[in-house]
């Protein structure tokens, strides 16, 4: 357990020192600031613009951050041969992956939380309702947990593929997860032969559906939020993360360093 | 520096061309057709494509499309260049915004007010606003605009009535909408429903002063009409034809007395149409 904790600390420390991660964070802040500025333009809809574009920025940057950090950490440690030293000690390979993943997850959660607070407080200060929209934290949470699922996919790919391919595949997986419902339409379509339909069916049932956590419109338009849906989808995503991590452990265990 | 010379020259040329075109547009040097072509923002992709690319943040894409459309319309309206509006772009952007974020109130409002003005896009406007009426159940104004568009542009009184009914049942609906709804119901001969709408309006605290008095007069008139209509129906059922005058209803015992209109005095019967005039 101490080994896992050490890797978590290392990930947190690296996030503060690495220029790539700091650059990403700076871009995320810049994007959110632009969204907030756009909200203050004289076109009205201050709160809606700030929340919609601000949280879109949170979604995009937490995703990029999670994918890059999961892939980059592992490959950099492999290339710099740090892992040889690490695994010469009584440390399991899964300790390393788990520690790195949790460290990345904490970074992603902190980033999403800070950006969410900035957006919510700006909305309260510049908005017309005068209320602090705490429920919008759910959007930050949504962005973070979906980024973590994609991050877990990235980690699985990174255990046996090159950096570039892993990143591209992880983004593709996120793209598929965000559009899984299309596969349901393809299954119903008569254009495709039987075997492709089987493939579509497998993808439809196996891949997590990011649109299931549909809370953006209710939060932004101040409708009733389905907290139960948020809870159940969170459980589903956490299960996916666990399964993906187990897959990553299994692949990394058999890999030659 | 030599390497970058070509780049700098290209950027400079692009700047000069775009500024020249802009000046050409504002000074009216370019023809209307060329202006229209140049002034137009790039076309909006279909909602299906945008939904696919949005990665679940459909609302953010809808908002960006809206922020893309709004300055375009604003600039044209402010400079009184409405004739230059590319209605196809306007309609497709609006449809995209509504398809991506069905709770986007302002898009429905613009659809009901601006898009309906172009006869070619009236049906699209009615379709989009109908969705807004269905989704935004706390808003009375969308149903009101929809009713107005059906009545004024489409000349469809039945649909207008449908939406006036909806508008009059929505919260915070102002008195004049109820009045219009009642007027259309009276025109259609649906007096009892008109009475219900007006009575509901009187019960609400928002109706005051002259409106309250006007509604009371209208209700009394409608109740008289309902009474006489029933008597006329009974007369027609027994004798197979309409009476010559309303006094015949009293003579044959269908009415105790002919009621008086609260402000205009006597009612009269048009024996040709069977309508009661006042």
Image: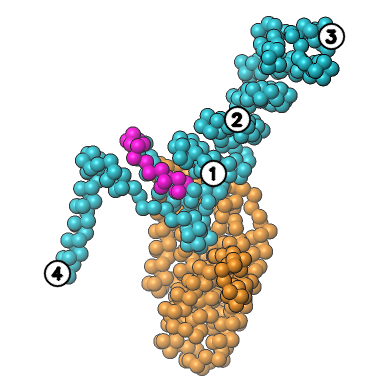
- Which one is in front in this view, the residue at disc 3 or the one at disc 1? 3
The reply to whether the C-beta atoms of the residues labelled 4 and 1 are less than 8 Å apart is: no
The disc, 2 or 1, on the residue closer to the chain's N-terminal end is: 1
Q: Distance between the residues labelled 3 and 2?
A: 37 Å
Range drawn in magenta: B78-94
Q: Residues within 10 Å of mark 2 (few under 14, many from 20)?
A: some
Residue B111 against residue B173 in the figure, above or below: below
- Which one is in front in this view, the residue at disc 4 or the one at disc 1? 1
Please state the chain letter of the residue tagged with numbered disc 2 in the rendered image: B
Please state the chain letter of the residue tagged with numbered disc 1 in the rendered image: B
* Residue highlighted by disc 1: B128
* Chain letter, orange in picture: A
Expressed as whole percent of the image width and height from the top left, the position of residue B83 reads: 35, 37
- Which one is in front in this view, the residue at disc 3 or the one at disc 2? 3
Does mark 1 fall on the same chain as mark 2?
A: yes
Expressed as whole percent of the image width and height from the top left, the position of residue A92 reads: 57, 88
Mark 3, secondary structure of its residue: loop
The disc, 3 or 1, on the residue closer to the chain's N-terminal end is: 1
Does mark 4 fall on the same chain as mark 3?
A: yes
At a point 39% along the width and 63% down the height, the residue shown is A27
Expressed as whole percent of the image width and height from the top left, the position of residue A86 reads: 50, 89
The disc, 4 or 1, on the residue closer to the chain's N-terminal end is: 4
């Amino acid at each position: 357990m101490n080994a896992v904790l050490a890797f978590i600390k290392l990930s947190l420390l690296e996030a503060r020192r690495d220029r790539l991660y700091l650059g990403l964070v700076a871009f995320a802040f810049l994007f959110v600031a632009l969204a907030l500025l756009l909200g203050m333009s004289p076109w009205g809809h201050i709160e809606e613009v700030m929340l919609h574009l601000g949280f879109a920025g949170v979604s995009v940057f937490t995703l990029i951050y999670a994918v890059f950090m999961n892939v980059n950490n592992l490959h950099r440690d492999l290339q710099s041969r740090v892992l040889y030293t690490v695994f010469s000690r009584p440390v399991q390979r899964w300790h390393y992956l788990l520690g790195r993943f949790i460290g990345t997850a904490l970074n992603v959660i902190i980033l999403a939380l800070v950006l969410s607070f900035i957006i919510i407080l700006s909305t309260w200060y510049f908005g017309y309702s005068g209320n602090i929209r705490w429920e919008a934290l759910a959007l930050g949470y949504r962005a973070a947990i979906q980024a973590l699922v994609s991050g877990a996919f990235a980690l699985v790919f990174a255990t046996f593929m090159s950096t570039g391919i892993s990143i591209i595949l992880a983004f593709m997986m996120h793209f598929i997860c965000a559009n899984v419902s299309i596969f349901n339409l393809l299954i119903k379509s008569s254009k495709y032969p039987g075997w492709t339909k089987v493939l579509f069916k497998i993808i439809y049932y196996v891949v997590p559906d990011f649109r299931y956590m549909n809370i953006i419109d209710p939060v932004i338009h101040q409708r009733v939020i389905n907290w139960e849906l948020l809870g159940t989808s969170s459980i589903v995503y956490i299960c996916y993360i666990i399964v993906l991590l187990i897959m990553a452990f299994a692949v990394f265990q058999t890999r030659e360093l | 520096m030599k390497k970058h010379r070509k780049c700098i020259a290209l950027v400079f040329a692009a700047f000069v061309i775009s500024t020249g075109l802009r000046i050409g547009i504002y000074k009216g040097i370019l023809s209307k057709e060329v202006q229209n072509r140049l002034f137009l923002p790039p076309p909006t992709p279909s909602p299906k494509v945008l939904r696919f690319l949005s990665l679940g943040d459909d609302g953010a894409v809808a908002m960006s499309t809206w922020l893309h459309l709004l300055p375009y319309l604003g600039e044209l309206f402010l400079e009184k260049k409405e004739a230059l509006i590319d209605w196809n772009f306007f309609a497709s952007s609006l449809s995209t915004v509504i398809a991506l974020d069905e709770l986007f109130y302002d898009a429905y409002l613009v659809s009901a007010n601006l898009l309906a003005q172009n006869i070619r896009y009236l049906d699209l406007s009615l379709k989009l606003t109908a969705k807004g009426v269905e989704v935004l159940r706390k808003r009375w104004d969308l149903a009101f605009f929809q009713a107005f568009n059906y009545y004024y542009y489409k000349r469809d009184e039945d649909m207008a009535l449908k939406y006036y009914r909806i508008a009059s049942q929505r919260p915070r609906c102002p008195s004049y909408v109820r009045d219009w709804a009642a007027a259309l119901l009276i025109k259609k001969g649906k007096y009892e429903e008109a009475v219900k709408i007006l009575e509901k309006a009187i019960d609400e605290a928002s109706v005051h002063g002259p409106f309250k008095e006007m509604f009371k007069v209208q209700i009394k008139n409608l109740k008289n009409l309902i009474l006489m209509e029933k008597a006329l129906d009974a007369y027609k059922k027994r004798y197979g034809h309409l009476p010559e005058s309303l006094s015949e209803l009293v003579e044959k015992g269908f009415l105790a007395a002919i009621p008086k209109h609260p402000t205009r005095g006597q009612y009269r019967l048009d024996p040709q149409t069977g309508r009661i005039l006042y």
